[in-house]
């Protein structure tokens, strides 16, 4: 990971009361609502909430950049909300038999791998991994795949189209999700290598 990336993360304003943070907080509060809607088979309502969450994710990013309201808290809340939405949607749909459990495992395993690297990075002054386009694109693909897969069980053309497009988006999203993990692992490798060089130089 480049030194400039660490400086960019560390110098993010330490603000709490911003519009993007409030939007992210509302998104977090909607996570258990989505799970309840999926488990009680209120799929249309769940789709509406998921779509609204995706739109709000885009809106808070635009506001943060346009009005200079980026913050350390926001950089934590925004991806946390995305991951929680993915988790509860996957678990809820798998519990109902709408998707196979192996898909849940593939997505969870990626987060376990990346999460296992974070303590090491934090101890070396990196509060987290910088967001990559691959990760954002993968998350976006998964977030719009799930509403489609929720509608895939409907009869007729709507259900058939939702099934095809939803699974295509899910496959692409998982691929990009793991591409982002590969980038994080490479950054971890760079930090380890830099530590080894610094340790050798001080001997």
Image (tube, helix red, strand yellow):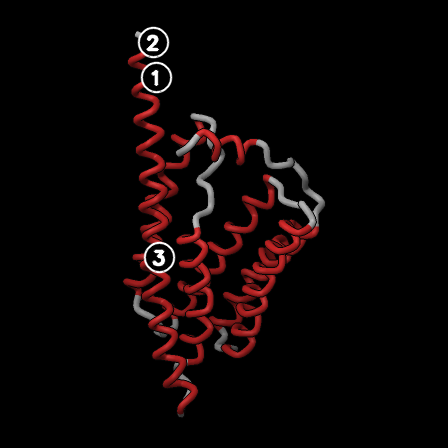
Tell me which label, 1 or 3, sits earlier in the chain.
3
Disc 1 crowd, CA 10 A, few/some/many (<14, 14-19, 20+): few
Rendered location of residue 182, percent (x, y): 31, 46
Q: Which quadrant would residue 121 be assigned to in this image?
A: top left
Residue lying at the far top in this picture: please name it: 203
State the CA–CA distance, disc 1 to disc 3. 33 Å
Q: Residue at x 30, y 68 (%)?
A: 100
Note whether 41 is above or below 75 in the view shown.
below
Name the secondary structure under disc 3: helix
Which residue is labeled 2 in the image? 202
Lower sequence index among marks 3 and 2: 3
Of helix, strand and loop, which one carries label 2? loop
Pointers 3 and 2 in contact (C-beta within 8 Å): no
Residue that badge 3 annotates: 176
Residue 100 in sight from this viewpoint: yes
- Using a 10 Å C-alpha cutoff, classify the residue at mark 2 as few (fewer than 14 neighbours), some (14 to 19) or many (20 or more): few
Q: Position of residue 115 (x, y in %)?
A: 39, 42
Look at the image and tell me in which quarter the N terminus lies.
top left
Q: Is residue 79 left or right of residue 103?
A: right
Specify whether residue 87 is in view: no
SS category of the residue bearing label 1: helix
- 53 over 7 or under it: above or below: below
Disc 1: which residue: 198
The residue that appears at 34% across and 9% down in the rendered structure is 202
Residue 119 lies left or right of residue 44; in this view the side is: left
């Amino acid at each position: 990971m480049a030194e400039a990336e660490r400086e960019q993360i560390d110098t993010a304003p330490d603000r709490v009361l911003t519009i993007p943070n409030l939007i992210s907080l509302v998104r977090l509060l909607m996570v258990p609502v989505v799970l309840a809607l999926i488990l009680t088979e209120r799929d249309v309502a769940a789709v509406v909430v998921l779509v609204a969450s995706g739109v709000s994710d885009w809106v808070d990013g635009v506001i943060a950049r346009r009005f200079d309201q980026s913050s350390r808290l926001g950089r934590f809340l925004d991806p946390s909300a995305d991951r929680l939405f993915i988790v509860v949607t996957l678990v809820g749909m798998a519990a109902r038999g709408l998707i196979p459990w192996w898909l849940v495992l593939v997505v969870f395993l990626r987060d376990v791998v990346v999460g296992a690297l974070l303590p090491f990075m934090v101890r070396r002054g990196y509060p987290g991994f910088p967001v990559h386009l691959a990760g954002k694109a993968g998350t976006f693909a998964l977030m719009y795949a799930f509403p489609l897969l929720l509608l895939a069980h409907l009869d007729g053309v709507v259900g058939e189209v939702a099934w095809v497009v939803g699974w295509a988006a899910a496959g692409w999203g998982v691929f990009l999700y793991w591409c982002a993990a590969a980038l994080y692992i490479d950054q971890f490798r760079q930090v380890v290598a830099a530590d080894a060089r610094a340790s050798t130089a001080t001997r």
